[in-house]
Image: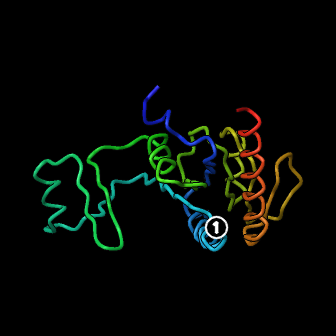
Amino acid sequence: MNNELSRLDPTTIVMQFVGYSNSGKTTLLCKLIERFTQAGVRLGVIKHDGHDFELDQRGKDTWNFRQAGAPMVAIQSATQTAWMENDAVPLPQLISRMSQQGADLILVEGFKQESYPKIVVIRREADLELLDKLHNIVAMVSWLPTQKMSIPVFSIDQEDEIFQFIQTYKLVQKEKTKDNR
């Protein structure tokens, strides 16, 4: 086992939000991030981008360092730090790093095929196919009229209920972890 992965704090809870593009995942996550932050939860957030993105700006020092061949570059100020790597870091390693930094809850947007607990966001009728394609679905958030299912189903505008569901899920998982020690 990768040494970094073995250091994942067993009390860190991971919850994925998955759905097709423009389903409302980011907007929902931003509302939940505000709620969890107000509740004092030490939060980590990871976003999957299916495209190649560039955080750095051409001509800036950190961009120049990476262009010169540095595989890892960090920049730090009095209030923030950014770390860039010229390599794709697997999701479990990102989660492990956030856990080591004290994240109590890690919200992940995307990474549909990963095995963490998922909340599926459904915008259109055609999106319902995701429910058959994905594993470890614990809830659904829908723009469509809600229907009875074997998992909890929330309307997209039920941020309070979704927040409470994750809070309860978090508590139940922490109790299970405690019982297994």
Q: Quadrant of the C terminus?
A: top right
Please report the residue visible at 67 percent of the width from the left and 44 percent of the height from the top: 117
| Residue for point 43% across, 54% down | 49
Considering every residue shown, the one lying at the far top of the view is 1
Horizontal side of 87 relative to 176 (left or right) equals: left
Residue 39 place in picture, x, y as percent? 67, 70
Residue at x 59% of width, y 68% of height:
33
Question: Is 28 placed left or right of 53 in the picture?
Answer: right
The residue most toward the left is: 68
- x and y percent of residue 173 in the render? 73, 45
Question: What is the x, y in percent for residue 102?
Answer: 52, 54
Instruction: From this view, report whether residue 39 is shown above or below residue 45.
Output: below
Residue 128, position as x, y percentages in the image: 72, 50
70, above or below 59, in the image:
above
Residue 19 visible? The answer is: no
Q: Nearer the viewer, residue 21 or 85?
A: 85
Q: Secondary structure at mark 1?
A: helix
Evaluate whether residue 176 shows in this view: yes
Q: Nearer the viewer, residue 27 or 37?
A: 37
Q: Nearer the viewer, residue 68 or 25?
A: 68
Looking at the rendered structure, the kind of residue marked 1 is Phe
Q: Quadrant of residue 103?
A: bottom right
- Provide the residue designation for mark 1: 36
